[in-house]
Amino acid sequence: MNSVYAFVVGPLAWFAWGVFIFGSAYRLVSMYQLAKAKDGSSLHYMSFKYGFRSIMAWLNPVGTLGWQRNPWTAMVTFVFHICLVIVPIFLLGHVVLWDQFFGISWPTLPDTIADIMSILVVVCCIFFGARRFLQKDVAFLTTGKDWVALVIPAFVFLTGVLSYHEIGDAKVMLILHILCGELMLISIPFTRLSHAVFGLFTRAYIGSEFGGVRRCKDW
Amino acid sequence: MPDASTWDWNPGRREIQDTGSWSDKFEWVEEFHASPDGEKVGAVVHKSDLEFTACVNGETWEEDYDRIFYPKFAPDGRFTGVAQQMGEWTLSVDGKHWPENYGYIWKTTFGPEGSIICAVQNDMEYGMGVDGVLWENFFENANNFTAGNDGKSTAAVVQVKPMGQADIETFQKGIYSVAVNGTVWDDVFMNCYTPVFDAKCEKVACQVRKTLYDYTIAVDGKIWQREYQCVWAPCFNPATGALVAPVRLGGKWGMAQDEELIWNNTFANCWHQQFSADGSKLYAIVAPTFGSFTVAADGKPWSITAPVVIDLAVSPDGNRAAALGKDDKAYTVMCDGKVWSGVYEMAWKPVFSPDSSKVAAKVEKNGRYTVVLDGKPYGQDFDQCWEPVFSPDSSKVLIRAIDDGKFIRIVAEVSEF
Amino acid sequence: MTFDRKIEDAGLERGVSRLTPERIENTLKQVIEGEAGAKLKLYAETCMRCGMCSEACHYYMSHEGDPSYSPAGKVHQTLGKILRKNYKVTAEEIYEMAQIAYTECNLCRRCVHFCPLGIDTGYIMSMVRRMCHKLGVTPQYIQDTAHSHSATMNQMWLKDDEWPDTLQWQEDEARDEMPNLRIPLDKEGADIYYSVIAPEPKFRTQLIYQAAYIFNEAGVDFTMPTEPGWDNSDMCMFTGDFEMMGRLKKRHFESALDLKVKRIVMGECGHAFRSIYDQGNRWDAWEMYPIEVVHSVEFFWELFEAGKIKLREKFKEPITIHDPCNIIRGRGLMEQSRKLAHALCENVVEMTPNLEHNYCCAAGGGVINCGPPFKNVRMKGNKIKAEQLKATGVNTILAPCHNCHGGLEDLNHYYELGMDIKFFGDLIYELMEKPE
């Protein structure tokens, strides 16, 4: 079991991070090349000012028509994403690993807060999953790829919570958690999770078109 | 062309007509037009009670009409207008109208020998006429009217098959062709655009849309064997008779000559190509990248660019070219790959001197008009002015202008600029 | 889920009857992989299928939450299906996709205000239309309009002489009221080139009359061209015939550039505005319109501000104002349209929602041009608009767009709203001071 653990936090972690970083970079660069070749008449209008303005507007959970008309989804989406990003970075258990491998560290979240936030992520995933089943318009759109994009983070946090609370075999759960995390890293560039890589750009693009060409807000 | 050598090229300013006084004589005076030699100024005038005539150098035409439009001076100085009487249309030339009436005539152009060419509608059929002599065959519809530089040859895109309302099937089988002097090509196409004559007026080429998606070029009714995503107006090499057209392949534009690319398809756009008189050089307006245009000579774009480039002019010797650049509301003159320093509210197509050494253009600044030569403005501006004309020896410029209610004619030495 | 709302259309039927599996696969592949680029790919990939956009769409709202009408739902049934089936879709499925893309989406882009990732469903639907165009599967009536554009450079099959003849006829008519009125033709160097869409000379000549009257009264130095290029409308943009869109815009702009005018002022049309600053110009590689184009709403306001139009009286009845997508969401003219509306009317009642969040008329995006077979698609698909209009409690609507006019007029009859619909030009002409 220890050798499995050593493998998942060692070579496999390197591999997962490698795929995540290089895969994301590759996707960004190749997408940019494609845009230059085929979307010259769109790329031309990219504007930092209007792109940024649009991103800022959409970072306000009550600031856009879409968020306002879908308040529950908006709230859950914000909670989900905030926790999803904050917990992995500031969790004590993770920072310890960075310290152990690279000798770098930074402030951490109290475990209880991180625990609550992780549970929130799982709850949010349940909410999203329930929407996919119960809400007609969402169910209509849902495909396997959407479940993949939902199940991956759900498992990452579920195994994290279980492992923290030592439910089930602690070692197995921890390894499962790490595996899921690595699966998520690997998935980001190549599944629907790629919106993490591209989302800011699609947002900035439409912001640029609406601000620069159409003189209208896109929220 | 009219022989400019017979014009008065004595340097100096001459007042031709007190146009300001016309408004006292008529209820209203429409736009002024100047004859090419600057000896005449004319306008359509409203006498009273919707009776219209034309006034040239203060003399009104004898005849009155219900309406006159398309007023134009012929190169030889005759003043013409499309005139309406009793609901029928004819062409009035110096106040004497053609004997025939037509359902409608319009788009007057002039041949070098003085022939007058019009588009004509008669009994809801369409065709063309030269000096009032109409094509033998008229068609259900015609457009894209053109004339050869012999002043006799005419061509237009014509509809040769009837089509019912919203009959997309028949349309897509092809109902259009090109009629040259009234005689139709054998083949029909979905669409034809911009027929053009070669220098000898022996051949006609045009853009063809074969299907909804495939474009090509036709010469005398025979299409090129290659298809393109799109094409723009073709033109003949005046020396060799070769035919070139901008073509779009893979979403980019290049230049094809007799089907084969002679400029690679690297441009975001490429149009308005023009050969030098000896056929050795080919210029065009191109966009090397999206949103920025320039002029390319033999496929090589100038380094200067502008968001919009229009009015390409090639010098008589073919070694120089000029065009207008436009950025938002500011016009500039681009010449030989450099931009003149002046920025204008409006500029007109640059004019080269016969020896190709000088370029002049009419420009507008602060609501006043003048002529700029090689970047230097003439010492005076005017309420109105026309495009400059160089003397045959290239040493003088004719400026036709209205200043303070007077139509004047100035012959300026090029050194005066 | 089966598509249970197939509507018979001669154009769509003829189109699919000619399809083969190879042609479908090759054409779809050619458009998605050959023509389209990163934009379409990213939209397809990053859409999280969250369904937040559903409520944005008037079709969805009017069909009691039928998910197949939501913006993402329409993508799911078109581009989504093509990609899921790896380009191997049937001719019957192409028919459905064409029906959805051409008649169940107005490309109004209201859904952009709902999507956190900024996905432009209007663009996706345009690309679906592009594929249908390349497959030859387009509704008959809009295709006929596209044919007219290609053959005459206007959308109403007007022949070259019929245009100047109509202008002269309107000039004659207007001279009964204002004897010295002129519609100057081909006046080189005029300040303004006035451009309209072909339905004006064909069916709504009074709009040309009114504009000429207003311009003459306000002392505007304007001209109208005699040659093709005068029609700034563009149904080819909506059929997916982008090559023809580029050709139309070239002709239009060059017609104005050749006349050396300072600006183009265009009539109260929406889609033509989209074509000149957003889509058509781009196909020709012009970053913006090569010559400034000012919408009537802006221009009328300019004349008001300069004191060139004086009113005899203001419109007294309460009036509401409809925000056309292509000039509001497409070009931000909400401020000018409000200033103008308030300058003309004593009591402007706002709709809810309004401004850039307004509901579409369901006629735009070429939908009304798909003709009678699809009229009910627009009527049933825009109950929400009828309710929105009714809720204002007023009898008159200001709608500065031709398509909106057509769409609202139809809704007005279908839902028996008893409302009167006006252009700004109608109101100005009606209320302005006129010489005795």
Image (cartoon, rainbow, N blue to C red):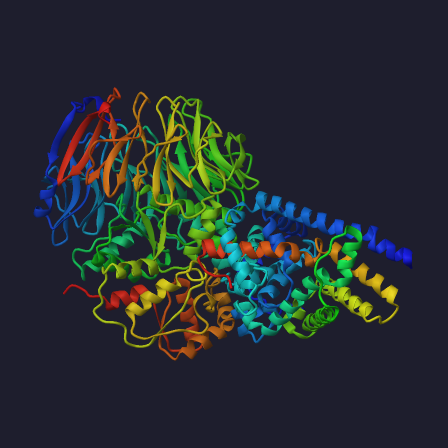
Tell me residue C136's x, y (percent): 56, 52
Say left or right for A175 vs C419.
right
Image quadrant in which you'd find residue C343: bottom left
| Residue C199 in picture, x, y percent from top left | 37, 59
Left-right relation of C70 to C159: right
User: Looking at the picture, how far across and down is residue C289, in whole percent?
Assistant: 41, 48
Residue drawn at the location 27% of the way across and 65% of the way down: C428
Q: Nearer the viewer, residue B308 or A215?
A: A215
Task: Please name whichever residue, B392 or B238, is drawn nearer the observer in this view of the structure.
Answer: B392
Q: How many marks?
A: 0
Q: Out of C290 and A3, give the one closest to the viewer.
A: A3
State whether residue B276 is above or below residue C193: above
Quadrant hosting residue B62? top left
Which corner quadrant holds the C terminus of chain B? top left
Q: Position of residue A202 (x, y in %)?
A: 58, 55
Q: Is residue C128 visible?
A: no
